[in-house]
Every structure is written in structure tokens, then in C-alpha cells.
Amino acid sequence: MDSNAVFAVVLLIVGLSILIAEIFIPSGGLLGLITFLTLLVSIIFAYRAWGRSNPDLFAAFCLMLLLLVPTAIGTGFYMLPRTPFGKKVLLEAPESEEVTPYLEETRRLEKMVGRFGVALTNLRPGGLVEVDGIRLHAVSDGLMVESGESVEVIRIRESQMVVRPGKAPQSITDKNVRSTENSAGLDFEYPSG
């Protein structure tokens, strides 16, 4: 076997090894430059070995080089998080709950969907409403709502309550009135006598 062919293959293997090492060892690009020069010299030796005598083998070597470089980079990045060094260097991705803004507020508001309340201010489109005795900011669903009008919570959009004009069914209103009377102490029985 020709010494140029041996050098071409050895330099290819060394260059790919240095390329993988570049992923694990922060060198500011120095190892990347060494990899580039090593692979360039490898191509030169491959040309000397096969360029004129066997151009198909030289083309196969160049094609193999073009396929092995991205494969080596991918392999390095695949192995990095699985090594002790990679586990120390790389941070774990946060959970979606950790990066979602106002998650608790959105969950609290979602429990109010389908409930009825009263507009405390004119909603054009935003304003204050009272639902279950809680004053909240809300936006109307495209219609202007006058102050004092009954509203229904229809959805939560980006931690914002969306309401539309609507009256509570009579059975719900009666239950709310009775529970308000009971809680206020207005509903009591007289002793029979």
C-alpha cells in the first residue's frame, strides 16, 4: 500500500477525532482550525495516492470525507449530554410550567369559565366585572357591555378573562339568592308555638 494512502487515511481518522474533541474541549476554535488543516492535508495525500491513478477512489474518499464530517459532529453532540462532563456543562431544559407566564392565575381564571357576573364598568372592550364576589378585569367578546349588565365568562385568553352579555339561568340565580340570604343570616325559621 502506498504511503500517501496510509497518510490520507490516518489523517482522516485523526482529523475526525480532533473534530469530536472540539465539541468536548472548549478551545475557542483552535481545535476546529487544526481539524480543518488536518483534513485538508488528508485530501492532499489522497490526491497524491489516487488522484491520477484511480480518480474514482479519490472521488469516493472525498465523498466519504463529506459524509463523515457531519456524522462526527452529530455523534459528538449526541454523546455530549451522556457524559459526566456534558452533564455538568449543559443545563436541563425547564418544564413548560416553569416558563409559562401567569400559569397559576390562568388556572384560577379557567375555573370561572361558564359562570355569570355583573359588569362594574362599561366594557369597551375592557373593564371591571364581578364574578362570584371577586372583582376582575375582563374584556368583552366584541360587543360593548354597559355597567350593571349581566355577563357570562366564556373563555380565558392569555390570562385574560373574556365575557359576553348573558343572564344566568333562573335556577342558578335562585340558588345564589338563597345562599346569599343564608349567609347573611336573613333566612331563619320562627319557633312554632
Image (cartoon, grey):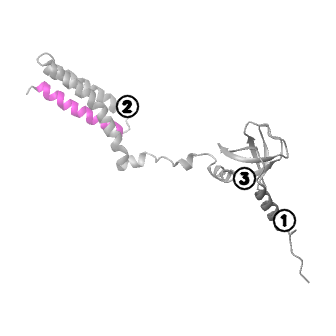
List the residue tagged with mark 2.
29
Task: State the residue in front, 6 or 34.
Answer: 6
Find the distance from the CA under tag 1 to the CA under tag 3. Answer: 20 Å
Instruction: State the SS at label 2.
Output: loop
What's the amino acid at mark 3?
Arg
Task: Check disc 1: other Cα within 10 Å, few if <14, some if 14-19, many if 20+.
Answer: few
User: Looking at the image, which is closer to me, 154 or 124?
Assistant: 154
Q: Residue at x 11, y 26 (%)?
A: 3
Which type of secondary structure does the marked residue at label 3 adopt? loop
Q: CA distance from mark 2 to mark 3?
A: 61 Å
Residue 75 x, y percent position in the rendering: 31, 39
Q: Residues within 10 Å of mark 2 (few under 14, many from 20)?
A: few
Q: Earlier in the sequence, mark 1 or mark 3?
A: 3
x and y, in percent, of residue 84 in the image: 36, 50
- x and y, in percent, of residue 82 in the image: 35, 48
Range of residues picked out in magenta: 3-23
**Left-right relation of 65 to 84:** left
Check disc 3: other Cα within 10 Å, few if <14, some if 14-19, many if 20+. Answer: some
Q: Are marks 1 and 3 in contact (CB under 8 Å)?
A: no
Please name which of the two marks, 1 or 2, marks the residue nearer to the observer. 1
Which marked residue is nearer to the observer: mark 2 or mark 3?
Answer: 3
| Front residue of 171 and 128 | 171
Q: Give the farthest residue toward the right.
A: 193
Residue 159 in sight: no
Instruction: Determine which residue is flagged by label 1.
Output: 181
Instruction: Give the SS element for disc 1.
Output: helix
Question: Rounded to the nearest whole Å, what is the CA distance between mark 1 and mark 2?
Answer: 76 Å
